[in-house]
Amino acid sequence: MRSVRVVAPAIWSVAFIAWIALGGLSFERFTVVFWVITALVAFTVGRRPWWRAPLDWAPFMVFFLVYDYSRGMASAVGFPTHWELPARIDRAMFGGQVPAVWLQERTAARYDAVPWWETISSIVYLSFFVVPFVLAAFFWMRSRTQFVRFMTRLMVISAIAVVGYVVVPSAPPWAAARCTHAEVVDHPASPACMDDNVPSARSDTVLRRIHPENEFSPVVRRITTRGFFAIPGMHVTDGFIKTGIDASNPVAAVPSLHGAEAMLIAVFAWPLVRRRWRPLLALYPVAMGFTLVWGGDHYVFDILLGWGVVAAVMFGLSRLERRPAAEAELEPVVVHA
């Protein structure tokens, strides 16, 4: 049995390293979950039944399978897509400015001169696809009760987001910057202007053209992931990342699930970590919010609404749950510096 405890993690590690070396990282949800679950099996073999992790994770993965297929329901159901309203709300909150426009105008660099800090922003953005499930695996190792609580909150927040995407489909800043008021007057879900890969600087777009200080694009672009490719060797992941982005619903912006999940992680983990690590937790949703707005993926309104969803879900589920037995409580996480 002791040999199995050594061999199984070794086999998993070799397979994982070989997969990365041959194909690069993948941020597709079920690929990430596959490696997380197989890691749990490999590293707990001999201490827990091998089928325990797949069985515990199965209900949540079924939910996310349904979730992935339901994200595109906005265009099928046919509710009018909001192109103007989110931008108007941001302008009202920020004295007539849309932060996405303001930030790209002043900080976005040319495509051939990506600064180092964009790599950090891109890693923060892409952490959305990995961190929740890695954290869930950590909870599963420590306490099944905390695992179920965390994943239940993640499911409820995702379900609320789907309702928002279907009932209030909304175009993100990068799309609004490509389309004129006339092209979206009928609230279309996928006008031709949205598919323009090299948007022009037409004068009557929903978001005004920008006047960058460093020869960047004259309109807001979707640039959240380009810093990732400044890391040597990461170009091999380009297909995986684009596949995930292209498969997403382009008008599923309200509320921001990226922003909501980052806040959920910070709030849920807050009482479980030592105080010296809490500033990093607090910084995570702020960094994610900045990345989403600066990168053209979301308005500030989308992110604040996502944070509000987290607050409501945390409050509601906490009221519904019974206090677990003392032995099921998760002890504070001890992270050694």
Image (spheres, helix red, strand yellow):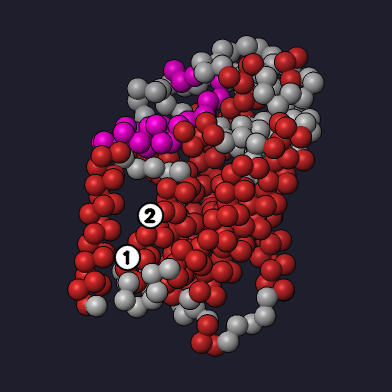
Q: Earlier along the polypeptide chain: callout 2 or callout 1?
A: 2
The numbered disc on residue 35 is 2
Residue at 54 percent across and 34 percent down: it is: 247
The percent position of residue 23, horizontal first and vertical second, equals 30, 38
Does residue 51 appear anywhere in the picture? yes
Residue stretch rendered in magenta on the structure:
215-242
Is residue 101 on the magenta stretch?
Answer: no
Given the image, on which type of amino acid does mark 2 rest? Answer: Trp
Q: Quadrant of the N terminus?
A: bottom left
Q: Residues within 10 Å of mark 2 (few under 14, many from 20)?
A: some
Does residue 96 appear anywhere in the picture? no
Is residue 217 on the magenta stretch?
Answer: yes
Q: Quadrant of the C terminus?
A: bottom left
- Name the residue that disc number 1 marks: 42
Label 2 SS: helix
Q: Can you say whether 245 is above or below 120 in the image?
A: above
Label 1 SS: helix
In the current view of this chain or complex, which residue is farthest to the bottom? 326
